[in-house]
Amino acid sequence: MHKSQFLSTSTFLAAAGLLLTACDKPPANTQAAAPAGPASSATIRPASAEVVREPYRYIDDAYALGDAFGDSPPDYAIDYDGARPWIWRSRSGDYRVIERTSDGERDYYYRAGADQPFLVRDPRYAYAYDRGQLVVVYDSSGRPVSPSIAARDADVAARYLDRARRLYAAAVHEQRQTADAADWLARRDQVSAQQRQWAAEQQRNDDWRRWRDDRGRRDDQGRAEQAALGEERAQRQAYAAQVAGAAVQRAQDQTQIQRRADADRRLQAVAAGDDRRARDDADRREQASAQARQQQMQAPEGRRQQALAEDQARQRQHQAEQAQREQAKTQEQQQAEARKAQAEASRAQEQLAKAQAQQAQVQQAQAEEAKRVQAGRNTPGHDKGHGPGKHDDKDDQHEGRKP
């Protein structure tokens, strides 16, 4: 990812004011028609060795980008082909485009500098592309589907790819407009629910989680991208909090206006001689109006806090599991080293015992040889050169004489 210009915090605040002002405007028709037939086709090709080894690379990149955007409002919207898609743009130049269709929300994810998506998601499947070719298809949770299902939906993927290219051109070149606040508040939970569905599958899916952990350890570029997206997420969370605070302040201002109006009505009722009933009616209206506004303000904030708490809990669980895996790996290495040292000690002892046995045999042989030499020296006549079995000729002659 490369650096490029992005909306500053002051621009975010200005956009927040426009976004809140737009609450009183009726939303335009934001539902897109189904994509027409493809101008160019996305064909199924045999998966490369890299894709086979890393089937979760595309879905994980899309999840990370969506997680960085969090529950912040769209940066802007455009009027395109009878629809009003929302656009988010990261500081690094990555894009996410969401449009409403007759089948539900459809999301498009683009890497920085690319005019075609690396992933498109509809309510049923997610389609991953590599240089304009369909390479992986995932189910709604983020699990890769069988090649037969991917081949069956190749035409759908081709239509999505064609529309994605045209949407990107419109997002870059068409006039930018403020996203309708009421429409965003109505659809924000649905967008967040789709992101949480991926997060839940990542926690359940050992292969996805293992790939994500390994990538963070071995890939410098992956670590740099994760750090950049973490900064993006922090800034957008602060922006979302500012927008929520502005909304609360606006609601409080409206409450003060309503209270003054109720007070004026009470004065008018007093002048008409019906002060008590008018006051009771005004109090009931004020109480009901205050409760309704409080519920309206608390509900989105409560959902946002709950989603934030769930996200933090998932992160803590993920960190704990990663620490356990690292500890288990370290223990396994230590055990392996201990077994290796024990085996080497056993071999050394065997070699020592063998050398001692050989030395004992040599010493025994030397002792036996020394005994034989000593026994030969102790035989009679040994000093005169008579060995065993030998005798003097004179003795033979003497023994042959007769008396």
Image: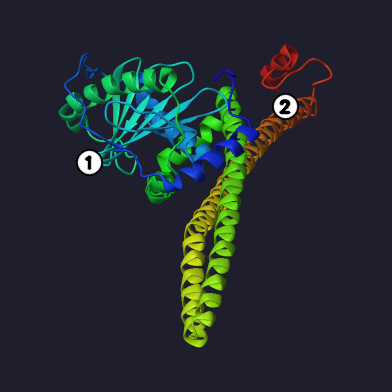
SS at badge 1: loop
Looking at the rendered structure, the kind of residue marked 2 is: Glu
Residue at the outermost right position? 383
Residue 159 on image: x %, y %: 22, 23
Within the image, what quadrant is residue 116 found in? top left
Looking at the rendered structure, the kind of residue marked 1 is Asp
Q: Is residue 326 left or right of residue 104?
A: right
Residue 297 percent location from the top left of the image? 51, 60
Write down the residue under mark 1. 103
What residue sits right under mark 2 in the picture?
A: 369
Question: Label 1 neighbourhood size at 10 Å, few (<14), some (14-19), many (20+)?
Answer: few
The residue depicted at 47 percent of the width and 86 percent of the height is 277
Is the C-beta separation of discs 1 and 2 under 8 Å? no
Q: Position of residue 158 (x, y in %)?
A: 23, 21
Along the line of sight, which residue is nearer the eye, 264 or 166?
264
Kindly report the distance in space between the C-alpha atoms of the residues bearing marks 1 and 2: 103 Å
Q: Place residue 181 in its image quadrant.
A: top left
Quadrant in the picture for the C terminus: top right
Question: Is residue 369 found left or right of 334 in the rendered image?
Answer: right
Left/right of residue 60 with respect to residue 267 in the rendered view: left
